[in-house]
Image: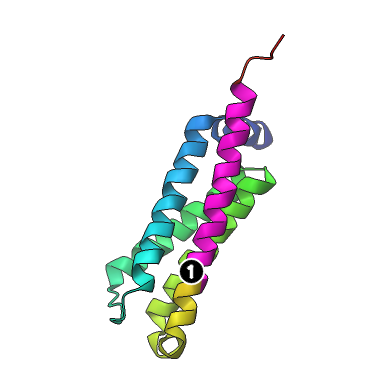
Amino acid sequence: MSHNHSGNAHATLCANRNSRIALIFVALSGMGVALSWRSLHNQDPVKIDMVFLLGHLIAIAVLIQLFVTLKCIRERLALGLATAKLSLGLFSGLVPSVVSPTSRLVKVGSLLLWVLAAILSISMLASSLQRQKPPVS
């Protein structure tokens, strides 16, 4: 029974088939790129509070649940990149003394992870739009 439920959830949430879901992937990864780009040019140390860290933990848990539900490789890769980025942010918030010396490298790595997720999201959007086109006769 859970396998059938998982299959139904995937059919509903598949970004390769559903352009609305693919648009959500594109919007969220685009926002991640913009925020990472902005922080790349900020020289001030980031001050992180416990609510921010709790938000990271909740987001990571949700992404992992989606990762288990979704079966397509591009979806899983995009979710994995987002999870890696959020885990990096969580680690840098919990242990700032370790991350501070490599702050620039961490910021560039964060931007690259979001850019890769955005590229994958755009490819999923293109795939979903292509599936919706009626065949040319």
Question: Is residue 60 within the magenta segment?
Answer: no
Q: In the rendering, at what x and y percent does residue 13 appear?
A: 55, 35
**Residue range (magenta):** 109-132
Q: Is residue 104 visible?
A: yes
In the rendered structure, the answer to whether residue 67 lies left or right of residue 50 reads right
Return the x and y of residue 120 as percentages of the image width and height. 59, 49
Q: Judge from the rendering whether residue 31 lies leftward or rightward of residue 66; answer left or right.
A: left
Residue type highlighted by circle 1 = Ser
Left or right of 70 on screen, residue 96: left
Which corner quadrant holds the N terminus?
A: top right
Identified at 51% across, 53% down, the residue is: 63
Q: Looking at the picture, tell me which residue is in the foreground, 8 or 43.
A: 43
**Disc 1 target residue:** 110
Q: Residue at x 39, y 85 (%)?
A: 96
Q: Residue at x 57, y 34 (%)?
A: 9
Determine the secondary structure under disc 1: helix
Q: In which quadrant of the rendered view does residue 91 lie?
A: bottom left
The quarter holding residue 101 reads bottom left
Kindly tell me whether residue 10 is visible in this rendering. no
Up the image or down, 117 lies above or below 12; here it is below
Tell me the residue at 67%/43% (across/down).
71
> Alpha-carbon neighbours of circle 1 within 10 Å: few (<14), some, or many (≥20)?
many
89 shown above or below 119:
below
Nearer to me, 16 or 136: 136
Assign the magenta stretch its main secondary structure: helix
120 magenta-colored: yes
> How many marks overall?
1
